[in-house]
Amino acid sequence: MPAHTRTRAQIEYDRRRIAALLVAGATELDCANEIGQSWSLAHYDCRVLRQQWRREAAADIAQERANLLAECRQARREVWEEWRDSGGEREVVTTKQRRRGVQLGQRGGDVPVDSTSEASKRTETRHRNPSYLDTLKGLMEFEARLLGVATQVDVHHSGIANRDCRDRL
């Protein structure tokens, strides 16, 4: 007697039903009873579904990682541009107005009798804003973690090394 064979459509239908049952917390035996097949066939379908889910999850994670990496690099470019723009030279214009004496105008307003205006212009060099560098450092560390090349480096100074060096001199 030949073994019962399922059509491609039947396999896909059974696997959709098994997937719904697995997500709901059913066991492989529950799945076998529900689709009316042997435990070994349900076990095989469950294994195929889990492998497919792992592949899809890995692809989703890789895509999300790529999206985050692209956003991080765009943010890094923008922060570099802002840091460059935060320094450089700028012109400062100062004006002074001096009024002496006021007299009542024809329409009731005050009119200055003697007024002088002075204007001066100077160029000053601005230092670049160091807070942008902190942001850049954080973005670079985040990118390194995304790429899996980050290393944890903790540097602690106890002060002993300085004393040892002085004793050796």
Image: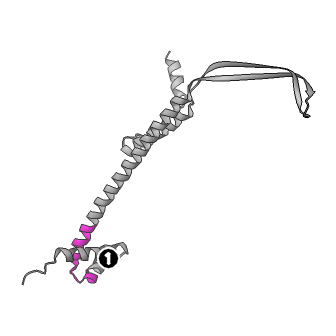
Label 1 Cα neighbours within 10 Å, binned few <14 / some 14-19 / many ≥20: some
Pick the front one: 70 or 134: 70
Q: Residue furthest left?
A: 1
Residue bearing the label numbered 1: 27
66 is higher (above) or lower (below) than 80 = below
Q: Which colour scheme is used?
A: one colour
Which region of the structure is painted magenta? 32-49
**Residue under the image location 31 percent in, 55 percent down:** 59
Image point 53% across, 30% down: which residue?
Answer: 85
Residue 41 is situated, as x and y percent measured from the top left of the image, at: 20, 76
88 relative position to 33: left or right:
right
Residue drawn at x 27%, y 63% is: 52
Res 69 → quadrant? top left
Depth check, front residue: 17 or 120: 120
Would residue 101 appear left or right of 135 to someone viewing this image? right
Most extreme residue toward the front is: 106
Give x and y (percent) for residue 95.
74, 23
Q: In which quarter of the image is residue 89?
A: top right
Residue 94, compared with residue 2, is above or below; it is above
Q: How many marks?
A: 1
Q: Is residue 131 above or below residue 9?
A: above
Q: What element carries label 1?
A: loop
Instruction: Give the quadrant of the N terminus.
Output: bottom left
Residue 144's x, y, as percent? 40, 41
Is residue 30 covered in magenta? Answer: no
**Is residue 40 highlighted in magenta?**
yes
Q: Residue at x 48, y 33 (%)?
A: 80
Disc 1 marks which amino acid?
Thr
